Image (cartoon, grey):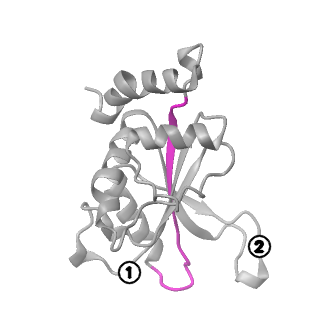
């Protein structure tokens, strides 16, 4: 069975975007391609920081994270080639829509003093990145078992050709953007 948000996209959002943007073909309509969730960890702080980040990320996404390693040494950051610097998970298809639905419906409203997401976080090619300061906004995380608070970056990759197309798509999908003044 398809996720709720994926059914909404195919039944209402895609036709609405076709009417608004006057696309000649269904395949020109922008869609979500993947979502990448990244946690950067400084292993110099504590020994178990990477394992805790991987455990939290796997609880949030339901997938096993992949370790990120340094590509080259940087002396100013006390970083050596091959050293673990974080972990990431890439979600596609049903898992992507499930995570996106949980993100906009349950996680983002749990942020204290949340006034909406910035519309300035697009990269120029239709991809949106948001930084979350704490992993405890997700209901899957048990607050009693948290050893350290860890931030994460969520990158939403779309097939949109411009930021305006991606903004329209994400607004129709329910992303809570802040109102411009």
Q: Is residue 156 magenta?
A: no
Q: CA distance from mark 1 to mark 2?
A: 27 Å
From the viewer's perspective, is 23 left or right of 93?
right
Q: Residue at x 70, y 77 (%)?
A: 79
Label 1 environment density (alpha carbons within 10 Å; few <14, some 14–19, many ≥20): few
Residue assigned mark 1: 148
60 or 29, which lies in front? 29
> Which span is picked out in magenta?
30-47
Q: Position of residue 162 (x, y in %)?
A: 66, 39
Q: Nearer the viewer, mark 1 or mark 2?
A: 1
Q: Is residue 105 left or right of residue 155?
A: left
Along the line of sight, which residue is nearer the eye, 76 or 108? 108
Q: Is residue 175 above or below residue 17?
A: below
Look at the image and say whether residue 42 sits in the magenta stretch.
Answer: yes
| Image mark count | 2
* In this view, 137 is above or below 167: below
Counting residues from the N terminus, which is met first, the one under dot 1 or under dot 2? 2
Residue 140 place in picture, x, y as percent: 25, 60
Q: Residue at x 60, y 41 (%)?
A: 164
Label 2 CA crowd tier, 10 Å (few <14, some 14–19, many 20+): few
Residue for badge 2: 73
């Amino acid at each position: 069975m398809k996720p709720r948000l994926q059914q909404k996209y195919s039944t209402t959002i895609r036709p609405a975007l076709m009417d608004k943007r006057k696309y000649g073909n269904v395949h020109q309509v922008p869609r979500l391609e993947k979502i990448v969730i990244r946690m950067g960890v400084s292993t110099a702080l504590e020994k178990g920081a990477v394992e805790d980040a991987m455990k939290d990320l796997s609880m949030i996404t339901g997938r096993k994270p992949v370790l990120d390693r340094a590509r080259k040494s940087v002396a100013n950051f006390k970083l050596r080639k091959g050293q673990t610097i974080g972990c990431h998970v890439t979600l596609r298809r049903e898992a992507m829509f499930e995570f996106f639905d949980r993100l906009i419906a349950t996680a983002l409203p749990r942020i204290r003093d949340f006034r909406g997401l910035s519309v300035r976080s697009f990269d120029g090619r239709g991809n949106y990145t948001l930084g979350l300061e704490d992993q405890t906004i997700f209901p899957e995380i048990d607050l009693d078992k948290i050893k350290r608070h860890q931030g994460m970056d969520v990158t939403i990759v779309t097939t949109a050709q411009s930021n305006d197309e991606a903004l329209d798509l994400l607004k129709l999908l329910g992303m809570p953007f802040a109102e411009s003044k």
